[in-house]
Structures are given as structure tokens and as C-alpha cells.
Image (cartoon, rainbow, N blue to C red):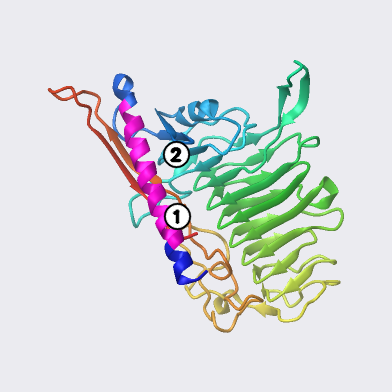
Amino acid sequence: MGTEGRLQARTKKLHAMKKFLSAVATAALSLFAQAQNTDAPMATLQHGDQTRVWMGVDAFIKAYEAAADSADVITLSSGNFRVPNEISKSFRLYGAGCEDDPATGTKATVLNSSLQFIPADITNEDGETVKAGRKVNGLHLEGVQVQSIYFNNNQLTPVENLTIAKCKITDRINFYHDSKNMTIRQSIIAYGIDNCNTHWGHYNLLITNSHIWSLPYSYSESSIHVDHCIVRTISGRVLCTNSILYNPLRSGSTSKNNIFVGTASIGNGVQDSNNNWTGIANAGVYAAEGEDGTYAEDKTFELKYPKKYVGTDGTEIGLYGGNYPWNKIPCTPRIMESNIDTKTSADGKLKVSIKVEAQTKD
């Protein structure tokens, strides 16, 4: 993208932030009769030019219930939120961040239980029930911490066009059945990804600039592309590029420009195996002393020799190369602080203070 394009993109994001700030401040005034104490969890719902606001631990549930099955945007502040029992609408969800941010003092947005996505039955114009008639398509999750994400019973209506960005999944993602055109980027998956291969009907999954403990065994050929990641264990067939790996790949996989830490083999039957580095010790990979590839919030995973370990795209191998260099801050206006007085002033005014910050880079 040229200078003019970057300026246009930045201007567009700044205009979006101003519009978002104005809409949230206006909607917050509607809380006059139910204003609660400061620093309560807060959710906003943007539907076109309309914005609504909810406070409290059930704010996400209320925003979801009010959302249409469209490109509505739900934005969550820092804090802990209860989640809907099941989610069958396609929307965009943004939190304040998947981990606490010491630099700004912003706390994470934490969802208190797992997210369960499932297609919903609908009633058509003739009054007939259409099984799984509403599918999850175009879903975007960013800047939240959640235990697990499950996509259930999607045989009739596959999950399509999914993006999970800058999230922390403290357990796993389980796709179960059909899914197509999915992207996971700049995220932490503490356990791994289950049931994601063409045996279950999964196609075109890109995992990029992410830290993952494990990828699953695949029964047949795979269309999983792992790029600029750190992965502890890979049990299935994958296309793996520009990543830091801790075990050999399975036969049928493709390996290009990967660092294999502590193992002298890239795996038997691996295709296109040129330009890989094998048998590298942890001390020769990471710049910070003591880093060993396991995830912790205070680890940077920066390369010790970024000019030596260069990927297929000409950028450094690992989390900081590629199209989405490692960055956990959501690239949308995020609610960092909200204060709404519980009482009006002598002239009948309610003091509302909302602090919003926008990240301008992906």
C-alpha cells in the first residue's frame, strides 16, 4: 500500500473513531434512568447509524439479543462478561484487548465462558420451519479472551468467512463440521485446534502470526496453511511456511523456510523441503534470554537473527514478519474507560465520560 493509500486508510479510521465516540456518548445519555456505578462492564451495539449501550456483566448478552443477523458491531469495554448460551447471528465483536495492557493500563475483555456457535432454525414466508436456515457467515471476533470456541452442528450450513483476530483462547477451538475460508491471526491458542481437516469438510484455513500449542491429526489431505507462527505440536498434514516449529511435520505436509527447534528432521515424506533450518537451539532463535517458545505475556518472541532467518515473502520468520506482524491491540476504537454518574447535577445534567482509543494498524 502506497503513502496515499495509507493516509486514506488512516483518515477513514479516524473518521470512524469520531463517529463511534459521538454515537456512544449520545447513546450513553439514554442510561439516565438506570445509570450505574463507574467502571462497570459496558457493551455498545452499532446498527447502521444507530447505537445502543448496556452496562453490567450481562451487557454482551443484551447487545447480542438486540442485534440483527447482519453486519452489526458489538464493542465491549474491559471487564468480565457473561455470554449468550448459543450464538447463531453473524456480527462483528470487538473487545478492549485479550490481555491486560501495562503500557496504557487497559484491562482485558474477558468472556466468562465458552462461545457456542450454532446455526438456527428459521421460519420461511410460508410458515414452514427451515432447519439450520440461518448460518454463521462473515463472523469477526477481535480483542477478547475466551476459554473455548465451538462451532456445532454445521453439517447443513457450514461456517464461512470467519476471522478470529488478536484473541486469546485459553483452551481450544473446535470446528466439528463444515467450514470454509477461515482466518486466525495474531492470536494465542493455549491448547489447540480440534477437528479441522478435509475429512470433516474444512477448507481454506489460514493461521498466521499466531502462537498455538497444537494442531490436530488429519485423516486425509489438509488445506490448513500455517504462516509466521510458533507451533509446539503439529499432528496433521499442513502447508507450513515462515514459522518456528518444535516437532517434525507429518508425511504429505509442505515445509518452506521454517525453523525446526531441537529436531534435526523436518519429517519423512515432507514436500518442498528446501530452505528450512533444523536442529536449532532455543538460545539461537530468540533474542531474549530464557525464551523457549512456550507462551507467556511477558515474552516477546523476537528473533535473535532476523536478517538470517528470512521467509518466502522476504520478511523475517516468526510472529513479526508477514502481512500481520504481532500486535495484540485491536485495530478498532476500543472503550478503555467509562464513567457514568449515578446522580444528576443541580441543573438536571448527567455526567458521562467515555475514553476511547483507536489502533490504526492491523
Task: Specify the amino acid type for callout 1.
Answer: Ile
Horizontal and vertical percent position of residue 291: 52, 69
Q: Is residue 205 above or below residue 25?
A: below
Dot 2: element:
strand
Crowding around mark 2 (Cα neighbors within 10 Å: few <14, some 14 to 19, many 20+) is many
The residue that appears at 25% across and 25% down in the rendered structure is: 342
The residue that appears at 38% across and 43% down in the rendered structure is: 19
Q: Is residue 22 magenta?
A: yes
Q: Which residue is mark 2?
A: 76
Residue 120 shown left or right of residue 103 in the figure: right
Within the image, what quadrant is residue 113 found in?
Answer: top right
Horizontal and vertical percent position of residue 159: 71, 42
Horizontal and vertical percent position of residue 188: 57, 54
Dot 1: element:
loop
The residue that appears at 64% across and 69% down in the rendered structure is: 243
Q: Which mark is residue 329?
A: 1
> How far, Cα to Cα, is label 2 from label 1?
14 Å
State the predominant SS element of the stretch in magenta.
helix
Q: Is residue 147 above or below residue 226?
A: above
Horizontal and vertical percent position of residue 110: 48, 40
Among the two numbered marks 2 and 1 on one chain, the one whose residue lies closer to the N terminus:
2
Q: Is residue 306 above or below residue 156?
A: below
Provide the residue span drawn in magenta: 8-29
The residue that appears at 62% across and 64% down in the rendered structure is: 229
Within the image, what quadrant is residue 254 found in?
Answer: bottom right
Q: Residue furthest left?
A: 346
Q: Is residue 67 magenta?
A: no
Answer whether residue 358 is visible to the viewer in this image: no
